[in-house]
Image (tube, rainbow, N blue to C red):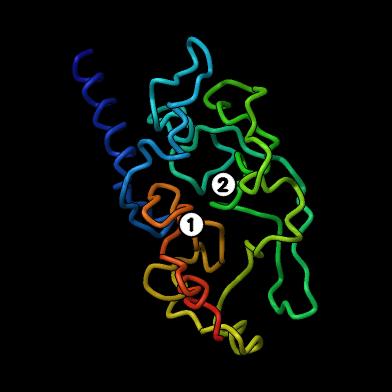
Amino acid sequence: MKGVKLLWIGFVFFLATGLMVSSHLNGVYAGSIVGTKHDLSIRSWGAGSGSNQICIFCHTPHNARTDLPEVPLWNHGTTTTNFNLYTSPTLDATVGQPNGASKACLSCHDGTVGLDVFGEKASSPHTIGAGRFNLGTDLSNDHPISFTYDAALAAKDKGLYAPVGADKVVEGIPLYYGKMECSSCHSVHDNTNQPFLRHTNVGSALCLKCHIK
């Protein structure tokens, strides 16, 4: 029993400090979510909610959910929304319904799934509040996601840099199975550059990692 307890403590520390490496998510996470907006343990959910833990809202070491296999040890309720997608006459990419890492993000940020729905809990009234971080189910006014970003797209668009590989646009801007996802620009475990950006956007520096302007 003592060994199991130590194993669990070690796992929680491993995830909370953001040092998880995943071949599926193509990234190493640095920093920590402790005390950030992604630290859901600081909210008041009521007794028995698991609110004294940090990682459990998204990850579990045992009996993980199978509805989002792209995300390691997924424990949160997954959105089933059919989103209204971004379109533009200048858009050359083919945008699909959010998948993989983006679907994990939207499982809180579309406002349809309770923030504290994890494990076997099926529902909760505690959805993300109104505001710019509640993207809703209409993504037509948000940056497109879940589209293939490759050399062919860059050549066709002429306003994008060609990616240096199938797993990244440039160093620090990952692709997921060759696609641009929410977590290409946002690092869920590191809020050094708010709001959870992978790079400072002072002077549009983050935007200019992909866009030629």
One can see residue 123 in this view: no
On the picture, is 126 further left or further right than 197? Answer: right
126 relative to 171, above or below: above
**Quarter of the rendering occupied by the N terminus:** top left
User: Could you tell me which secondary element the residue under label 1 belongs to?
Assistant: loop
Report if the CB atoms under discs 2 and 1 are less than 8 Å apart.
Answer: yes
Residue depicted at 52% across the width and 84% down the height: 161
Residue depicted at 49% across the width and 37% down the height: 74
**Quarter of the rendering occupied by the C terminus:** bottom right
Please tell me the numbered disc located at residue 41: none
**Residue labelled with disc 2:** 105
Choose the circle earlier in sequence order: 2 or 1.
Answer: 2
One can see residue 158 in this view: yes
Q: Amino acid at mark 1?
A: His
**Residue labelled with disc 1:** 186
Viewer-side label of 2, 1: 1
Query: Badge 2, how many Cα within 10 Å: few under 14, some, many 20+?
Result: some
On the picture, is 178 further left or further right than 22? Answer: right
Residue depicted at 33% across the width and 56% down the height: 28
